[in-house]
Amino acid sequence: MTSFSQDIKNKLSNLNALDKIIAVNLVVYAIGFILTKSLSLPNETSLKWIELPSDFFDFVLKPWAIITYGFTHYDFWHILFNMLWLYFIGRMFLNLFSTKMALNIYFLGVISGGLLFMLGYTLVPHVFGNASSLVGASAAVRALLIFICAYMPNQEVRFFTFNLKLWYIGAAIVALDVLGLFGLNAGGNLAHLGGALLGYYYAKQLLKGKDIGKGFEKLMDGFVNLFKPSKKSPLKTVHKNKSKVGGYTKGEFNKFNNQKKIDVILDKISKSGYDSLTAEEKEFLFKAGK
């Protein structure tokens, strides 16, 4: 049993950050599935407390939902396609950019998708219908995909027997999401567009030399550090030697200082002669000579 658990730990430690996000999504899906079956709950209700509501007032009561909804899935095919997309996009992304940037875009995509979703239901409720809730990692996946397509639009990828430029793929996906606003999953497609907008803006700013995710990164680092145990260095008493000046004993310091004065006086003699010395300098040189 110990060997088995150690193998699992080793495998998890070898996963990259996006693979770990996939693992978290799968665990949350499994928890929801188990709760639904074991408690005989209605479909798509077992994880209600981490879904994102469409109403801003409901959101105020559970602000964590702006992040947690992105890890929530009920439908098997929904999580399967989201995680497959994330797996392949993640491989491409991490070959080109840093892990921290991937996490910035992923979580900012989740937040942007959620905010646009709530904004749509608040401003034009007659378009999207009754109050609803949002689940799924699609907005985050869209953010990563559209970022890549916008950052290197002319890069070609193999699609069956021909090549396609990345911007063609990005434009086609955004067009499908826009069309989806008129379908049954209008709220979900609105969130997709929120993630896509974030990915596009992030890429364009990065091309100008500005990483818009740095502020979010610092915020998350600060949040994580709150839960890390502080490493206090052991206290040590330092006894100062008051008889030392600048690391020298007083005798050493005086000797060093006198030698410097002698060097200055001798230099003056070599340049201007002995007669150029002051009475004080002549006296000091005489005493030093003894």
Image: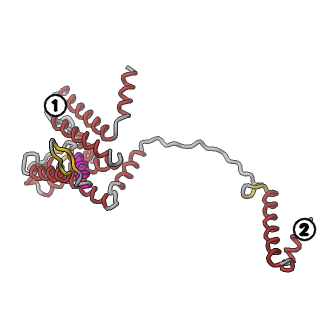
Q: Position of residue 205 (x, y in %)?
A: 29, 60
Query: Quick one: SS at disc 1?
Result: loop
Can the viewer see residue 88? yes
Q: Kindly identify the residue that appears in the image at 11 percent across and 56 percent down.
A: 124
**In the figure, residue 151 lies in which quadrant?**
bottom left
Q: Kindly identify the residue that appears in the image at 18 percent across and 47 percent down.
A: 163
The image quadrant where one finds the C terminus is bottom right
- In the rendered structure, are the residues bearing label 2 and label 1 in contact, judged by CB atoms less than 8 Å apart? no
Q: Residue furthest top?
A: 1
Q: Amino acid at mark 1?
A: Leu
Rounded to the nearest angstrom, the CA distance separating label 2 from label 1 is 102 Å
Q: Position of residue 11 (x, y in %)?
A: 35, 30
Within the magenta stretch, is there residue 142?
A: yes
Residue matched to label 2? 287
Q: Kindly identify the residue that appears in the image at 19 percent across and 34 percent down.
A: 46
Count up the numbered dots.
Answer: 2
Tell me where the magenta segment starts and ends, as one range: 139-151
Q: Position of residue 100 (x, y in %)?
A: 36, 48
Magenta segment, prevailing SS (helix, strand or loop):
helix
Q: Amino acid at mark 2?
A: Lys
Query: Quick one: SS at disc 2?
Result: helix
Can the viewer see residue 198? no
The image quadrant where one finds the N terminus is top left
Front position in the image: 67 or 93: 93
Q: Is residue 183 above or below residue 212?
A: above
Q: Earlier in the sequence, mark 2 or mark 1?
A: 1
Q: Position of residue 288 (x, y in %)?
A: 88, 66
Crowding at mark 1 (Cα within 10 Å: few <14, some 14-19, many 20+) = few
Residue matched to label 1? 41
Q: Is residue 257 left or right of residue 50?
A: right
Crowding at mark 2 (Cα within 10 Å: few <14, some 14-19, many 20+) = few
